[in-house]
Image (cartoon, rainbow, N blue to C red):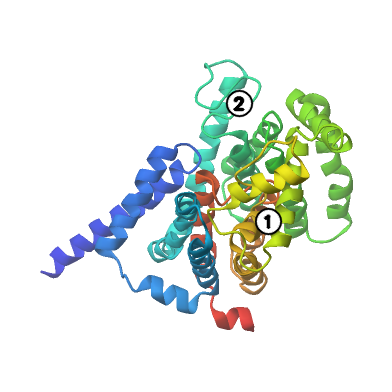
């Protein structure tokens, strides 16, 4: 009987680990498959794991507590929205975050390293396909074009994924005891992914790349003359090289500068519209600072404000800035709970001393940067990335740790 039960337990463990590996393997490469595996993981947890884990996590883990508080406030803001249908549409995107304690419950210590490396391998495959399109070895597929070769996701998500993956490769290069071959491959992919970052069009990921690179320099080389020299000479040299050699990066930098300097003359540019979206959304917040307009009413209220302040500009359903979007639709308490999610992550990074301490600091910083340019916790790819790595990095946070 004991052998039979032990065999069942081993099979369950194999299924659990296989599903998690498949989830990380499909993170950057398939919405459909990744979603299927996501729901298979949820079903597995429902049938085989401890259902009290969520309640325990909410009580003991402040990160999970603020996730649930944030989503709870969004849900409550349905009470004062006139467009329930749109409100539920937005809420459904954020409900994915409630799965974080489920993933925390399923991921074991022994799984963490293989899951992170599985993700890196998956991104390496995506990068190889990107180069294959760019060099016209294969025909463009899905989102990719020869000019902007991002195969499985738009450049809005692809370059942030690249930036974070480059950081992970640098982390393993400096902290792991790998073979010479593996370290050589890591350096190769750091270089090729950095080049790939600048032959695609996503500016958010490019900004995040430079910030994470500066962070990595000080994390792994310490604060000294060498690290300062890299920050003030090598990193600017990377920017100049990318600007002078990459047509798409050169064009998008020039376009961004032109759009900002000529904002008053032409607001209907990519950067100009984002500035106008932000200005109009701030007006919305001024009118409804406490409760917001309701989670479903942003599109309607934005039309009104746009008509008053910028009638020649096009309207939007979200301002391409996660912070003001949360505040405008669901009020200051939603905004504060949202910010607390990342504050808790950063405090944990400062106080927890384990091998993933550098990533614990880099990960929230990475999201805090990119969310100034879009609502990245509404999109499939970046939301699942947040769920996956948050579940690995912050499952051991306690209230006592944060308060100490």
Left or right for 128, reference 367: left
Residue at 31% of width from left, 50% of height from top?
Answer: 40
Q: Residues within 10 Å of mark 2 (few under 14, many from 20)?
A: many
Q: Position of residue 4 (x, y in %)?
A: 13, 64
Q: In the picture provided, is 48 more to the left or to the right than 205?
A: left
The picture places residue 187, in percent across and down from the top left corner, at 66, 40
Q: Residue at x 69, y 56 (%)?
A: 284
The x, y position of residue 351, in whole percent, is 65, 74
**As displayed, is residue 321 above or below residue 123?**
below
Q: Give me the residue at 67% from left, 50% from top.
A: 321
- Residue topped by disc 1: 324
Residue 132 left/right relative to 312: left
Q: Nearer the viewer, mark 1 or mark 2?
A: 1
Q: Which mark is residue 352?
A: none
Q: How many marks?
A: 2
Q: SS for tag 2? A: loop
* Nearer-N-terminus badge (1/2): 2
- Label 1 neighbourhood size at 10 Å, few (<14), some (14-19), many (20+)? many
Per the image, label 1 sits on a secondary structure element best described as helix
Alpha carbons under labels 1 and 2: distance apart: 31 Å
Residue at image location 54% in from the left, 74% down from the top: 62
Asked whether residue 133 is in view, the answer is yes
Would residue 319 be seen by someone viewing this image from the given angle? Answer: no
Q: Which residue is mark 2?
A: 149
């Amino acid at each position: 009987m004991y052998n039979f039960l032990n065999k069942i337990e081993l099979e369950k463990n194999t299924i659990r680990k296989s599903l998690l590996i498949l989830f990380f393997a499909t993170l950057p490469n398939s919405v459909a498959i990744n979603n299927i595996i996501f729901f298979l993981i949820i079903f597995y947890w429902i049938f085989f794991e401890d259902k009290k884990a969520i309640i325990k996590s909410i009580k003991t883990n402040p990160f999970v507590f603020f996730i649930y508080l944030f989503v709870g406030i969004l849900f409550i803001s349905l009470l004062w929205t006139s467009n329930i249908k749109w409100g539920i549409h937005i809420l459904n995107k954020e409900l994915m975050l409630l799965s974080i304690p489920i993933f925390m419950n399923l991921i074991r210590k022994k799984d963490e390293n293989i899951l992170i490396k599985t993700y890196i391998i998956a991104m390496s495959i995506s990068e190889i396909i990107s180069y294959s399109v760019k060099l016209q070895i294969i025909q463009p597929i899905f989102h990719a074009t020869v000019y902007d070769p991002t195969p499985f996701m738009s450049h809005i998500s692809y370059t942030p994924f690249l930036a974070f993956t480059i950081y992970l490769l640098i982390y393993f290069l400096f902290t792991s005891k790998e073979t010479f071959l593996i370290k050589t491959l890591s350096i190769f992919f750091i270089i090729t992914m950095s080049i790939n970052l600048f032959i695609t069009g996503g500016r958010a990921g490019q900004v995040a790349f430079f910030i994470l690179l500066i962070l990595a320099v000080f994390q792994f080389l310490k604060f000294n003359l060498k690290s300062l020299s890299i920050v003030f000479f090598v990193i600017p040299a990377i920017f100049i090289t990318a600007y002078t050699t990459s047509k798409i990066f050169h064009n998008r930098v020039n376009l961004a500068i032109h759009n900002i300097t000529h904002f008053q003359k032409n607001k209907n540019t990519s950067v100009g519209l984002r500035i106008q979206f932000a200005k109009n959304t701030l007006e919305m917040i001024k009118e409804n600072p406490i409760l917001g307009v309701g989670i479903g009413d942003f599109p309607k209220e934005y039309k009104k404000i746009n008509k008053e302040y910028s009638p020649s500009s096009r309207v939007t359903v979200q301002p391409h800035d996660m912070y003001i979007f949360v505040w405008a639709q669901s009020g200051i308490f939603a905004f504060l709970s949202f910010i607390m999610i990342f504050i808790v992550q950063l405090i944990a990074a400062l106080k927890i001393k384990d091998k993933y301490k550098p990533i614990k600091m880099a990960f929230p910083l990475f999201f805090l940067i990119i969310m100034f340019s879009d609502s990245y916790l509404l999109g499939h790819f970046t939301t699942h990335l947040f769920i996956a790595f948050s579940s690995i990095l912050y499952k051991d946070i306690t209230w006592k740790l944060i308060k100490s």
